[in-house]
Amino acid sequence: GAGVSQTPSNKVTEKGKYVELRCDPISGHTALYWYRQSLGQGPEFLIYFQGTGAADDSGLPNDRFFAVRPEGSVSTLKIQRTERGDSAVYLCASSPGRGAYGYTFGSGTRLTVV
Amino acid sequence: AQTVTQSQPEMSVQEAETVTLSCTYDTSESDYYLFWYKQPPSRQMILVIRQEAYKQQNATENRFSVNFQKAAKSFSLKISDSQLGDAAMYFCAYVERSEKLVFGKGTKLTVNP
């Protein structure tokens, strides 16, 4: 596609539920990144994929968070047993190779846990 | 750990005037990249300007330019001829070979007509 697409745009869920957030990167972009942006803060790194594999998942806060990219294109961020502290905007970005040459971000998913 | 500091939570400028947003960073690396991103209410991070650390020449993109002071680890953004559409959150960001973008907390820019 022309840009990075993230769905849903907004998600409200109850505490304890499971959610999936989807990212559809620019076609051909091998690198894909997930960031979390809490209110009033800059985005914080969660995980980085190069192709199908997670090259760096050091930013995932705990084992309730998991992400996959099975075919090297679309990625899904999965959050189990959601907590109110998980409420944030989850941003996805992709790049054609090394990120320093250009990241394209999506518009994010605003997750609200009530 | 690398950090990025934006010391101005909010800034305002009159339309057609010039404004400078500040950013400092901390790193022990010599090869890295610096960015300024704009985030309007639509939430999408839009790249404004990019600077390679090994280049001494300051990057420019139309009305946007940077003052990159490598020794001082400073990377400020100058917006000339400010327009109403420039109003947004601006984030300074850094990346080196780890591929992890590190962002500052942002500066909210208001443009007054």
Image (cartoon, coloured by chain):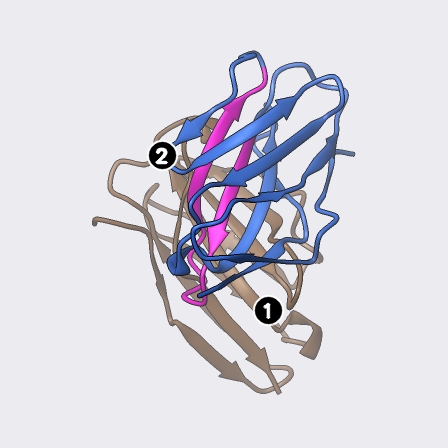
Chain colours: A brown, B blue
Number of marks in the rendered image: 2
Neighbor class of circle 2 (other Cα within 10 Å; few <14, some 14-19, many 20+) is few
Q: Which mark is residue A56?
A: none
- Circle 2 SS class: loop
Q: Quadrant of the N terminus of chain B?
A: top right
Residue A23, x across and y down, in percent? 38, 56
* Chain letter for mark 1: A
Residue B30, x across and y down, in percent? 67, 14
Q: Residue furthest left?
A: A1
Residue B40, x across and y down, in percent? 45, 61
- Figure quadrant of residue B5: top right
- Give how far apart the Cα atoms at labels 2 and 1 are: 33 Å
Q: Is residue B68 left or right of residue A48?
A: right
Q: Residue at x 65, y 70 (%)?
A: A86
Q: Residues in magenta?
A: B34-53
Q: Nearer the viewer, mark 2 or mark 1?
A: 2
Residue B109, x across and y down, in percent? 56, 58
- Circle 1 SS class: strand
Q: Which residue is mark 2?
A: B62
Q: Which residue is mark 1?
A: A88
Q: Quadrant of the C terminus of chain B?
A: bottom left
* Chain letter for mark 2: B
Examine the rendered structure and indicate whether residue A104 appears above or below residue A75: above
